[in-house]
């Protein structure tokens, strides 16, 4: 048997060397990418689910996935109005059906009229359907107390990720010491580090202050950019607000400081604002970077370049699967905008159902429309439940000796700090990976180790979503408590 | 006025220099991209449409767009069954509705069951929903007379473009003389040249033989790869069959020759087969590269690396807006597959409505199901009309002195050769761009100049889709005839 296995390993090696495309010949930038949110832990979770189905005995009967911000997968229901309109657009014969409210039908007719041939099946302009870009601009104006938004500055996208990568791509140039550097927070959402690895741009890490609720300190930005100027060309600063994975909500003063810093240091600002409706903590409020920028006066608003990102995937709707999103660009060079339009046109256009869904998000039922009451009820309920779960998560985790959890002010995650026993730290694996893998195997809880997001050396965390249904979330938190105690005893 | 204009140009220049992101500092690879299918002609067409709406007088009342393979925009109707299922998936309350046939409901239930939380709004696995990958594998097996297909080799994608760019990305490495070279046909679909420009990979052009119905000659491949080995590392060969923009369908012998060539020259094969149902000419037949590869025996089928691409956007369904697609990879190194899975996971997953639509394409109504008759009727009608239009296009264009049009054997385009008068060739613009722009301004017909796809020096072409509704296509062809005559007289 052993000899047969060696044979086949040998054969597979020869094959591998003979292949045109193998790990030695492939794109080295792709090899450098890491994306923990869907990494080894999640792959093992999928495997365990299959084993459970096949009847393999485990100390649990289901895997609870708290690794990814996927509200519907965790049981959140879609907003009725949104799905009615999508169904009407997909199958316009339903426009004759009495069961659908008039406002849903009107909305569907309006969207279809803006589609080529009146069909969701036609391509749109590469930057998105014009009517929808106009609706996005109106939404932004309303959100930002009337500060104007120009539909020509709006680019619809495939989720926010697509637009973020596109902007990073535009910004990347130079070689060696002139290579583009991009500032990202630590901890960060690993889309950023992954995109920078793929583009071979330089990641400039700035640390959020865990002791101050993961807030951003401009002095830390100054330290980071100064150090980076020695070896690259810092050109952009990425902010995630409300924060992923950290759940903090930036106050207005902080945003002003960041904008001033970007102006002084001549940096392009990228504001990832996909959690803009997800603010739970009293006294916290979402301030868009654009609004603050314009309220700081033309000294800043006419100069600072900004791209802001939003998506259909989070907030109260959680429609990740539709891959809808947009970005608004402020003060972008007109020639660069032409290049951007050309670049996105190669991929033809974002999904039209995703564009349609985005239109409903930015232009939901109005007070005088029949679907308004239900819409408000559903939206309020979704946000209320998230808010409750945010509080519960913080409270329960902070009762566990060895876990410290900052308040979940917003977004959909907590990133608690773990005190790990010595023997766990001497393990061969990254200690928080070891911890999370054991938690998965023993408890059936799927979290992402902090190392996937970045953390200060010698500190350990995990990211957990607050999305499991309340009863399940309780179980998750109890299981973590039990596990953490056992783990600490076992490895002390 | 002049001084004011100069002022504002100066001001805009100063602004531009002050910007972090301007055409001098942006990614130079992005600047090199060209994408004619949505280039200046199309932008001008959109402008003219706006002018017409505003009441500007033109020698025509509408712009007919034959620049892009967008069937629904040109009036083709969606397949009823597909849209019923999508509507049911989007708004599952409709599962209680008697108006929907049982097979549509069963299909929707099956898709929803495979979705996280039973919702189109959840993310799927990055490579796509497992059930759908299984359906794709079954579709391929059936298409290829039983040659096995493994769902683990299937990656769902955002249209075919996304998967093609992903494969090219994996294949790109090296610097200078070791930089990856990729062989693409001339004329080509500009997605390929655009992706290679963005990746800074080397484009290796091989010419299709216009005099032999745009067929592919392996001797030309040999010439091209030999010349390329002097300055880069040729690693992949891209084939579009049926051809875009050329409309040829490759015969079996040709495909065998290409596979042998790829094996000899150690090239990764990329087969763009998105027009696999679009074969019109008697005696022509679609042969998948995979089927031919496996029928050539294990000498080839165990060695040649192949990625094949398909999409929901073309064929009889034309559902471009859903951005559905897949790729199948054959003989891919298992470690590279892990890297591929990681790479696509950064963008989370392809649109779920697009995945659902793809599922219906690969698993349409069966003979014992209630929707079968209507489905077959609609599919047959769509393909029949395309076939008629393919014939008509060739016939009419070949009656025009100075236009030579190869038979449209398949796909959705013709790429006729233009004899242009001398004075038109001395114009400052590329002569076929000059021709197409004038055609747009004078006749309201929007085509793409051949230079956007590549052509032999000194030859001129345009690409035209055969998609306008029959009556409109007649008008388009008549207008081209009239225009070509006038143009020839004017510039002789």
Image: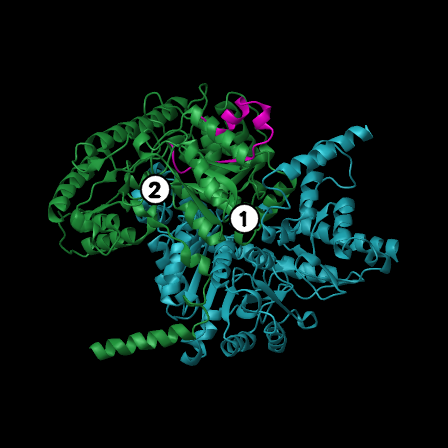
Chain colours: A cyan, B green
The residue carrying mark 2 is A119
Where's residue A26, x and y in %?
A: 59, 46
Q: Is residue B313 magenta?
A: yes
Q: Is residue B93 left or right of residue B243?
A: right
Q: Residues within 10 Å of mark 1 (few under 14, many from 20)?
A: many
Choose between B28 and B375: the one closer to the eye: B28
Question: Based on the displayed image, in which of its 4 quarters is residue A134 positioned?
Answer: bottom left
Q: Is there any visible trace of residue B92 in the rendered image?
A: no
Q: Is residue B38 magenta?
A: no
Q: Secondary structure at mark 1?
A: loop
Residue density around tag 2, few if under 14, some if 14–19, many if 20 or more, within 10 Å: many
Residue A251 horizontal/vertical position (percent): 56, 73
> Which marked residue is nearer to the observer: mark 2 or mark 1?
1
Q: Which residue is mark 1?
A: B172
The C terminus of chain A appears in which quarter of the rendering?
A: bottom right
The region drawn magenta spans: B287-315
* The N terminus of chain A: image quadrant: top right
Residue shown at the point (72%, 51%) measured from the top left: A476
Say which element carries label 2: loop
Q: Position of residue B149 (x, y in %)?
A: 56, 28
B247 relative to A20 in the view: left or right? left
């Amino acid at each position: 048997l052993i000899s047969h296995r060696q044979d086949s390993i040998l054969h597979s090696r020869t094959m591998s060397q003979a292949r045109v495309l193998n790990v030695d010949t492939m794109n080295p930038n792709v090899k450098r990418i890491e994306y923990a949110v869907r990494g080894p832990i999640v792959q093992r979770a999928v495997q365990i689910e299959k084993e459970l189905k096949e009847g393999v005995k485990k100390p649990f009967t289901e895997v609870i996935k708290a690794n990814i911000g996927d509200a519907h997968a965790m049981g959140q229901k879609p907003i009725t109005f949104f799905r009615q309109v999508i169904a009407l657009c997909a199958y316009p014969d339903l426009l004759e059906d009495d069961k659908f409210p008039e406002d849903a039908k009107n909305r569907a007719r309006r969207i279809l009229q803006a589609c080529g041939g009146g069909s969701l099946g036609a391509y749109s302009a590469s930057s998105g359907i014009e009517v929808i870009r106009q609706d996005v601009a109106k939404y932004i104006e309303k959100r930002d107390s009337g500060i104007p938004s120009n539909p020509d500055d709006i680019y619809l996208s495939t989720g926010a990720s697509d637009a973020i990568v596109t902007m990073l791509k535009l910004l990347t140039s130079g070689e060696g010491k002139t290579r583009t550097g991009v500032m990202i927070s630590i901890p960060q959402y690993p889309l950023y580090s992954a995109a920078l690895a793929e583009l071979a741009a330089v990641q400039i890490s700035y640390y959020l202050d865990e002791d101050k609720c993961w807030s951003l300190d401009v002095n830390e930005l100054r330290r980071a950019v100064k150090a980076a100027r020695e070896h690259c060309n810092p050109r952009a600063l990425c902010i995630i607000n409300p924060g992923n994975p950290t759940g903090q909500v930036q106050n207005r003063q902080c945003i002003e400081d960041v904008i001033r810093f970007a102006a002084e240091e001549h940096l392009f600002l990228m504001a990832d604002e996909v959690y803009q409706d997800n603010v739970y903590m009293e006294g916290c409020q979402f301030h868009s970077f654009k609004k603050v920028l314009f309220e700081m006066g033309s000294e800043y608003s006419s100069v600072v370049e900004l791209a802001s990102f939003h998506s259909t995937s989070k907030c109260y709707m959680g429609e990740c699967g539709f891959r809808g999103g947009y970005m608004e660009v402020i003060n972008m060079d007109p020639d660069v905008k032409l290049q951007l339009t050309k670049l996105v046109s190669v991929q033809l256009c974002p999904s039209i159902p995703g564009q349609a869904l985005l239109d409903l998000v930015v232009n939901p039922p109005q007070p005088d429309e029949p679907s308004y009451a239900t819409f408000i009820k559903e939206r309020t309920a979704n946000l209320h439940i998230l808010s409750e779960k945010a509080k519960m998560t913080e409270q329960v985790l902070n009762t566990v000796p060895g876990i410290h959890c900052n308040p979940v002010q917003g977004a959909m995650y907590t990133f608690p700090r773990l005190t790990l026993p010595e023997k766990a730290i001497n393990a061969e694996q990254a200690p928080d990976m070891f911890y999370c893998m054991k938690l998965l195997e023993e408890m059936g809880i799927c979290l992402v180790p902090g190392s996937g997001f970045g953390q200060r050396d010698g500190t350990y965390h995990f990211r957990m979503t607050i999305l499991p249904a309340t009863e399940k979330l309780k179980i998750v938190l109890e299981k973590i408590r039990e596990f953490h105690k056992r783990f600490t005893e076992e490895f002390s």
